[in-house]
Image (tube, rainbow, N blue to C red):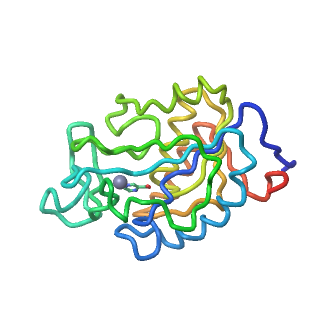
Amino acid sequence: MTEIRPGDGDALIIVDVQNDFCAGGALAVPDGDAVVPIVNRIAGAFDIAVLTQDWHTPGHASFASTHGREPFETIELAYGTQVLWPDHCIMGSDGAAFHPELQVPTAQLVVRKGFHPGIDSYSAFLEADHETPTGLTGYLRERGAKRLFVCGLATDFCVGWTAMDARRMGFEVLVIADACRAIDLNGSLDEAWGEMTRLGVGQIMSGDLAAT
Ligand code: VGL
Ligand code: ZN
């Protein structure tokens, strides 16, 4: 792969690098902390950088405890099948805070998602009903973003859904594979890469980026 030099029209989307998805967190992604130094190294190369934050109400519809069920079971909600998770990223909690070593002072926007009690939101663009927008599409278009680089946690859920919705919104999309880690639940990682590839999401490594 030839070196990629981020420039005009390029944006970095840093997905859910939060305590609950890192070591010791309520929904710890295996090796999730490993993305932190990579994100810290590359973020400054992008003129547009956005952070996302999973941000749930207590008793959120995506929590197993809300339904008296066990984590990682699935249920049918009005908008479709929902994986049930341990309580995580409750708005304002330490678990919902960014990893303490995440250092992206140049980021300009934090998008919080999943704050409607009855709707989950893996994607940073559209909630899980596939119709409620977060506002990120408009923000990125107004700032002139054309090509999005996506990294963070977790590859097979919030990173993947964000990357796929970005394609559907008409952006060029590259996932920075080594700057992501996956939950990998029942083959979800292979499935996510398959769907991303079908939608034209590209894959690079952080080392492909010039001067980072
Ligand atoms: C995520 C499951 C539930 C993620 C968020 O950030 O990938 N996964 N909420
Ligand atoms: Zn969540």
Q: Position of residue 80 (x, y in %)?
A: 27, 41
Position of 180 with respect to 77 (left or right) is: right
- Residue drawn at 26 percent across, 65 percent down: 71
Which residue occupies the extreme front position in the image?
105
Q: Position of residue 207 (x, y in %)?
A: 79, 59
* 87, 154: nearer the viewer: 87
Q: Residue sitting at 52 percent across and 29 percent down?
A: 137
Q: Quadrant of residue 115?
A: top left
Query: Count of labels shown?
Result: 0
Is residue 119 left or right of 5 when viewed as pictured? left
Given the current orientation, which residue lies at the most extreme bottom position? 24
Seen from the viewer's position, the closer of residues 56 and 187 is: 56
Quarter holding ligand 2: bottom left
Please state if 89 lies on the left or on the right of 192 as rendered: left
Q: Is residue 70 above or below residue 54?
A: below
Q: Position of residue 179 (x, y in %)?
A: 63, 60
Residue at the limit of the structure toward the left, as seen here? 68
Q: Name the image quarter holding the C terminus.
A: bottom right
Residue appearing at x 58%, y 59% in the figure: 180
Quarter of the image where one finds residue 12: top right
